[in-house]
Amino acid sequence: MTLEFLVASAIGVLVAGGIYMALRGRTFQVVLGLTLFSYAVNLFLFASGRLTVNRPPIWSKTVTEYADPLPQALVLTAIVITFGMTAFAVVLALRSFLETGSDQVDGDIVPCDDQQSDGNDTG
């Protein structure tokens, strides 16, 4: 009972942190938020196959109960998809930064990011 509560709490914290980070204004924080959210989905998929300890993955002559291998396969597939999505988001964020000079999601340049100064430092 406590293991299920701990896993459910971890999934909730990861989802909350992922949503919070994905709604931030900087591209790096958005990428981190998407990554946290994908970790939460992976943990949810893994926990959906019943959390069993010391059970064979498919079949054994001595043990009658076994762990479900389908969630493990789904998690492995989700890890590969997450890696591709994260790599694409990082490249997209880098290109956006190089073209606009800012890492803001909406493309606006904030005063601390202003790299287009005219060279007159009067302040």
Image (tube, helix red, strand yellow):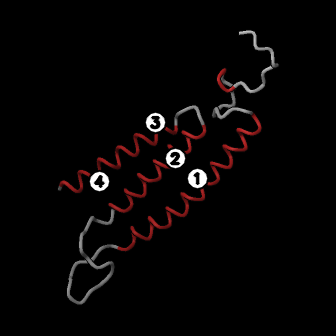
**In terms of sequence position, does the residue under pointer 3 or pointer 2 come before the other?**
3
Mark 2: amino acid: Leu
For disc 4, the marked residue is 7
Q: Residues within 10 Å of mark 4 (few under 14, many from 20)?
A: some
Give the Cα separation between the discs numbered 3 and 4.
20 Å
Q: Residue furthest left?
A: 1
Q: Secondary structure at mark 1?
A: helix
Q: Secondary structure at mark 3?
A: helix
Q: Indicate left or right for 110 with 49 as reference.
A: right
Q: Indicate left or right for 87 with 68 as reference.
A: right
For disc 1, the marked residue is 86
Q: Mark 4 and mark 1 in contact (Cβ < 8 Å)?
A: no
**In terms of sequence position, does the residue under pointer 3 or pointer 4 come before the other?**
4
* Residue under the point 28% across and 65% down: 50
Mark 1: amino acid: Thr
Mark 3: amino acid: Tyr
Q: Indicate left or right for 81 with 101 as reference.
A: left
Q: Nearer the viewer, residue 66 or 24?
A: 24
- Kindly indicate the quadrant of the structure image that contains residue 119: top right
For disc 2, the marked residue is 34
Q: Mark 2 and mark 4 in contact (Cβ < 8 Å)?
A: no
For disc 3, the marked residue is 20
Give the Cα separation between the discs numbered 4 and 2.
19 Å
Q: Secondary structure at mark 4?
A: helix
Q: Residue furthest bottom?
A: 61
